Image (tube, rainbow, N blue to C red):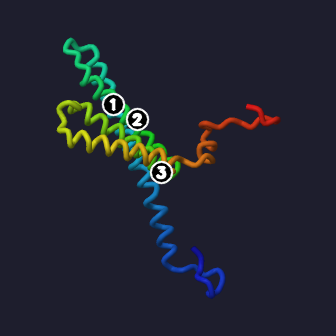
Amino acid sequence: MTAPPGSPPGREVPYTGVHRLVRRLIEPAQDTLVALLAVAILGLMARGLVTLCAHLISPGFSVPGVLADALFVLLMVELQRLVIIYLRDHHVSVDVMIEATIVAALREVQLHGALELAPLQLISVTGFVLGLGLLLRFGDLRAPRRRVRQHGRGFRAPTPHGTP
């Protein structure tokens, strides 16, 4: 920030220097902590994959256990995506958070078993997941097309004659 209107040009407001200094010191520290979080999530994914493989080859193979481990790994993938988006853009992607919450809710239902849940709990979880799905679909939370194009996903170069 520069000087307020009406003050002589070239003068800075004293507190803006402090803001810049704090931001310059805290942002790299925060990025370091988030990068360490990304490494920890990567470790959790690796541990989840090892557990998944162990459940697959064990003689006491249980489908719910394997599904719970697979959903855990998928949840870690979504959280890893969220951390990567934060490190790249310095903001939290709400649509990825909603996707991760849907996966986590479904994992919990699958882990406890839909048949073992009380009817009211099952209705509540169903409403919760449907609400999140509607928010994701109609809430206009997706990244703008220009950001998607910048990162090379879903972008097709226009052809000279307008044909696909």
Report how far apart the C-alphas of labels 2 and 1 lie in the structure. Answer: 10 Å
Crowding around mark 1 (Cα neighbors within 10 Å: few <14, some 14 to 19, many 20+) is many
Kind of residue indicated by mark 2: Val
**Residue, disc 1:** 71
Element class at badge 2: helix
- The numbered dot on residue 112 is none
Tell me residue 158's x, y (percent).
Answer: 74, 37
Report how far apart the C-alphas of labels 3 and 1 lie in the structure. Answer: 25 Å
How many marks the image carries: the answer is 3
**Residue, disc 3:** 139
What quarter of the picture does the N terminus occupy? bottom right
Report how far apart the C-alphas of labels 2 and 3 lie in the structure. Answer: 23 Å
Crowding around mark 2 (Cα neighbors within 10 Å: few <14, some 14 to 19, many 20+) is some
Kind of residue indicated by mark 3: Gly
Crowding around mark 3 (Cα neighbors within 10 Å: few <14, some 14 to 19, many 20+) is few
Which of the two discs, 3 and 1, labels the residue nearer the N terminus?
1
Tell me residue 133's x, y (percent).
Answer: 41, 43
Q: Residue at x 20, y 30 (%)?
A: 115
Report the residue that reaches farthest toward the right.
161
Q: Is residue 60 above or below residue 113?
A: above
Confirm or deny contact between disc 3 and disc 1 (CB under 8 A). Answer: no
- The numbered dot on residue 77 is 2
Kind of residue indicated by mark 1: Leu
